């Protein structure tokens, strides 16, 4: 049975909405899934796009899936009472690699400190960012929106990757994941109700949130990913930009 990673945040609900596949589901925050995948404890998982780039020689990508937005994403927020041009320190979450690097790309002059330390701004992702938008009146700056304003391209936060040698069944599992997303798009009210029961947010809020997320890994998403990796290299967060290597149907059996 394929060991399939699942990000613990509500953004995974469409991908797992009605997944028709026998898998061992392993749930964790993005940085945990990164570590488990690279450590050989998972056969397939959504991995932070920057961590894929840093370890691309060990991994293969699914060609049809990613986690991205074209504009505001809601679940990645820089919270600051100061204008962004005045921010000199950012307290960053330990749960996400890509968002931390994206913050450095967007605010290259700002020093990063651990979340909870005194800072001009704090970076929140996932459900913590969604909850903060309800509870904290401090201005929230959406990193997906800031990225689109800077580049005009989608921001790819995560890609789906499998360690080499790729286990048997991963290519077929990709088709089941894509089918689940398609069903989620076809029945948004059912998706929102189910996600509301699991995660506790209002169904109407989740329906609007899911509309902002993108899961197809098409030409614009790949252009956005390459642009992000180029800028990550320019700020010293990546040594070189890798070739995107994809899982093929002839996966190697275990």
Image (cartoon, rainbow, N blue to C red):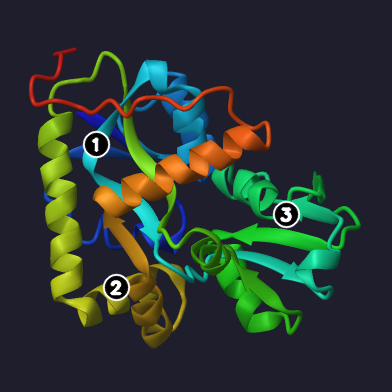
Q: Secondary structure at mark 2?
A: helix
Nearer the camera: disc 2 or disc 1? 1
The foreground one among 236 and 21 is 236
The foreground one among 88 and 124 is 88
Q: What whole-number distance in Å separates the C-alpha atoms at marks 2 and 1? A: 26 Å
| Quadrant the C terminus occupies | top left
Other residues around mark 1 within 10 Å, as few (<14) / some (14–19) / many (≥20) = many
The quarter of the picture where residue 118 lies is bottom right
Q: Residue at x 41, y 50 (%)?
A: 224
Q: Residue at x 51, y 25 (%)?
A: 54
Q: Earlier in the sequence, mark 2 or mark 1?
A: 1
Q: Position of residue 114 (x, y in %)?
A: 80, 46
Specify whether 6 is left or right of 130.
left
Q: Earlier in the sequence, mark 3 or mark 2?
A: 3
Marks counted in the figure total 3
Query: Is residue 27 placed above or below 239 in the rendered structure?
Result: below
Query: Is residue 175 placed above or below 150 in the rendered structure?
Result: above
Q: Which residue is mark 1?
A: 62
Specify whether 241 is left or right of 188.
right
């Amino acid at each position: 049975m394929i060991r399939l990673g699942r990000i613990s945040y509500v953004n995974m609900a469409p991908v797992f909405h009605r997944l028709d596949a026998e898998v061992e589901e392993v749930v964790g925050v993005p940085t945990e899934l990164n570590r488990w995948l690279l450590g050989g404890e998972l056969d397939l998982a959504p991995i932070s796009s920057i961590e894929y780039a840093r370890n691309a020689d060990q991994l293969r990508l699914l060609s049809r899936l990613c986690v991205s937005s074209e504009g505001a994403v809601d679940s990645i927020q820089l919270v600051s009472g100061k204008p962004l041009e005045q921010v000199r320190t950012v307290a960053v979450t330990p749960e996400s690699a890509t968002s931390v690097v994206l913050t450095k790309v967007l605010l290259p002059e700002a020093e990063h400190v651990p979340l909870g330390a005194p800072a001009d701004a704090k970076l929140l992702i996932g459900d913590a960012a969604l909850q903060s938008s309800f509870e904290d009146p401090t201005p929230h700056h959406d990193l997906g929106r800031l990225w689109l304003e800077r580049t005009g391209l989608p921001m790819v936060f995560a890609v789906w990757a499998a360690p080499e040698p790729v286990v048997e069944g991963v290519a077929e599992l990709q088709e089941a994941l894509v089918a689940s997303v398609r069903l989620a798009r076809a029945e948004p009210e059912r998706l929102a109700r189910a996600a509301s029961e699991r995660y506790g947010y209002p169904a109407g809020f989740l329906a609007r949130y899911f509309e902002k997320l993108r899961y197809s890994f098409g030409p614009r998403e790949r252009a956005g990913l390459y642009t992000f990796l180029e800028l990550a290299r320019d700020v010293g967060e990546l040594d070189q930009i890798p070739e995107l290597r994809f899982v093929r149907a002839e996966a190697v059996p275990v």
